[in-house]
Image (cartoon, helix red, strand yellow):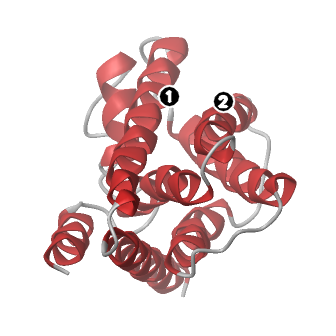
Amino acid sequence: MRRTLLLALLLAAASGASAHVGHGSGGSGFPGGFLHPITGIDHLAAMVAVGLWGAQLRAPALWLLPVAFPMIMALGAFLGLLGMPLPAVEAGVALSGVVLGACVALALRPPLWLALGIVAVFGFLHGHAHGTAIPLEGSPLSFGAGFVAATGLLHLAGILIGLLLRWPRGALVVRGGGVAIALAGAWAFAAWLMDTI
């Protein structure tokens, strides 16, 4: 339970309740892109959740989910950079934490194609949000490489936390982390709602 509380505190300490509050402070280029996913609670929570859920589902999902997310995210980022309109992206990004956190909390085991589909949809939304946030100055490719690298590290963090599943009480800790992620996503979604009212 202490680890679950620690994870919840870390998630709560991250800045930016809505998808892009506080983003952009890292500037352009690789550093700006790298900081973008880790300075927003919604991005951070969902990306850690992908690694945790993959760990729960085990191979091949353990590797397929964390690979599929950034691949589809890159496509979403490209279309966002081109200015392709997509309604309610911010809401979808916030809800990704709720849905992925719930998948971890409930230890859901859908067919692999469905798990990949869920991760792909949210990866696309996160990518689109990143793409629309790419600064005009500097290199968009460098910025994109930064946020893909950070995403991979956040997935890896989730997988490493998922190593707790090897111990009897580890499953409870991981599921508690899913609850914390779902709550963080709900907080981000509530912040998005408040911004739109």
**For numbered disc 1, what is the local secondary structure?**
helix
On the image, the x and y values in percent for residue 126 come to 60, 49
Question: What is the quadrant of the N terminus in the image?
Answer: bottom left
42 versus 31 height, above or below: below
Label annotation for residue 88: none
Which of pointers 1 and 2 lies earlier in the amino acid sequence?
2
9 versus 150 height, above or below: below
Label annotation for residue 74: 2
Front position in the image: 147 or 68: 68
On the image, the x and y values in percent for residue 76 come to 71, 38
Q: Is residue 19 left or right of residue 108?
A: left
149 versus 183 height, above or below: above
Q: CA distance from mark 1 to mark 2?
A: 8 Å
**For numbered disc 2, what is the local secondary structure?**
helix
Determine the residue positioned at 24% across, 75% down.
4
Front position in the image: 189 or 65: 65
The amino acid on which the numbered mark 1 sits, given as a three-letter code, is Val
Mark 2 residue crowding within 10 angstroms, few (<14) / some (14–19) / many (20+): many
Determine the residue positioned at 54% across, 60% down.
56
On the image, the x and y values in percent for residue 147 come to 45, 31
Q: Which residue is mark 1?
A: 148
The amino acid on which the numbered mark 2 sits, given as a three-letter code, is Ala
Q: Is residue 19 left or right of residue 170?
A: right
Question: What is the quadrant of the C terminus in the image?
Answer: bottom right
| Picture quadrant of residue 86 | bottom right
Residues under numbered marks 1 and 2 in contact, where contact means CB atoms less than 8 Å apart: yes
